[in-house]
Amino acid sequence: MKYKSTRGQVAGIGFIDAVLMGLADDGGLLIPESIPQVDADTLTKWRELTYPELALEVLSLFIGDEIPRDELAELIQASYTTFRDPEVTPVKRLSPERAVLELFHGPTFAFKDVALQFLGQLYAYISQKTGSVIHILGATSGDTGASAIEGVRGKEGIRICILHPAGKVSRVQELQMTTVSDANVQNLAVEGTFDDCQRIIKELFADVSFKKEYHLRAINSINIARLLAQTVYYFYAALKLAKDGESRLPNFSVPTGNFGDIFAGYLARRMGLPIGRLILATNENNILERFVHEGIYEPGEFRSTYSPSMDIQVASNFERYLYYQNGEDAAKTAAQMAELSKSGRIVVASDVREAVQADFAAYGVKNAECLEAIRVCHADTGYLLDPHTACGVAAGGRIAASGELTVTLATAHPAKFDESIQLVNIRQTFPAPIAALFEKPQHATRVEGSADAVKDELLRFF
Ligand SMILES: *Cc1c(COP(=O)(O)O)cnc(C)c1O
């Protein structure tokens, strides 16, 4: 399989080069040259596979023979033995019409581990095969940072620097990142929002000579390997439900920020996985909800909510969807992205808007509604939702028709967001690995929100 850019100036590169490139050199995002197709017979066979076996099948379609199958199998095995649940991503039923797909059984208790444990293994593999250093640079709204650090801490040949918005991540998220004492880890607490962090990263990666000189690599969800790893659990959940005798096609409700997770669902459907609706759940930062309803993509004012990992106005993976929506027209996509940076918005025609609405239903969950979803679910079922998952459950409840089955992606464990859980007067017991964090010393450097300031810190660290 070869990869190409959504803006048309990069093409014909292999999987490993696509992983290493992160953001495409023309400023676009990398995508496979074609979407592999999975037929019904294959899907039926895949029902019998364990999570790592399934991941091997799905990822092989995108990697081909670039990584020998037995080596890829080892990488996948190493990625998922760190998960606490034998099923890796189990589906739990809450009622006849509702289920959650628990994606938080990895080391940092959020779904980011599913992709970043794999990407960490992949980077170590590449570094070892090529004998090259890998400098990872990433921005986080909270969960990615901890998860990426956990994926590569202490690994030889790899250094990692993570930017997070100072004071705008949850206490546990901050502790998970900053209590790591391995020398190959640097944390920068940036004065600004997550969007500022993401902009800085984009600027540094766009500086192609700097990127090349320092072997800068991305871990943000612009990295194609993450999206591919995330398609696996859509297959896993849908096939598991079918195997257990479920005859309805499940809707998936996806708590959305950067559009990575839901894009993986879109990709799974384009590969031939039969699913119901893809429900795009946002919080009050609802640029994507507005896009689906109005056909206008325009960042609004930033709001802090109970679901900080979704406090995002510029969804970095959106361009990939735009590209497919444009019938894979790279020139048109590049022009729209140029329009976005010039005028601050993209407006699509009404026929495109209708096509978007055929792909996604969307709902923006208000703060009060998020807390209410946590309270009601806990009262009705005893199941404690984290605030991100709660947005997904609330959106699913708004959009799904009676009788449909909606699976919400449970993107984090509630212990990561106890600040919000306390607001609904629910007391939870922290899992031991989280409770232990409060005792450890923290390591982070505060830095002003500009690319130059971050570059200075990086030069010191590398
Ligand atoms: C990252 C994250 C999201 C948003 O996922 P995207 O792929 O950015 O859309 C939702 N919930 C949690 C807990 C997250 O960490």
Image (cartoon, grey):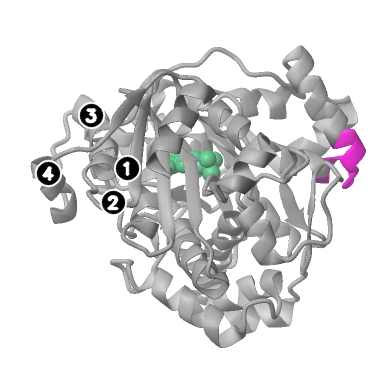
Label 3 sits on residue: 419
* Residue ranking furthest to the left: 439
Tell me the magenta residue range.
324-333
Q: Where is residue 349 in the image (x, y as percent from the top left)?
A: 88, 25
Disc 1 residue: CB within 8 Å of ligand 1: no
Element carrying mark 2 = loop
Q: Nearer the viewer, mark 1 or mark 2?
A: 2
Dot 3 or dot 4, earlier in sequence: 3
Marks 3/1 in contact by CB < 8 Å: the verdict is no
Position of the N terminus by quadrant: bottom right
Q: Where is residue 340 in the image (x, y as percent from the top left)?
A: 76, 21
The residue at 63%/72% (across/down) is: 58
Label 1 sits on residue: 385
Does the image show residue 266?
Answer: yes
Residue 187 vs 218, above or below: the answer is above
Which residue occupies the foreground of this view, 1 or 416?
A: 1
Which residue occupies the foreground of this view, 214 or 291?
A: 214
Residue 30 vs 444, above or below: the answer is below
- The circle on residue 440 is 4
Dot 2 or dot 3, earlier in sequence: 2
Amino acid type, residue under disc 3 in the picture: Glu
Q: Residues within 10 Å of mark 4 (few under 14, many from 20)?
A: few
The residue at 68%/51% (across/down) is: 266
Position of the C terminus by quadrant: top left
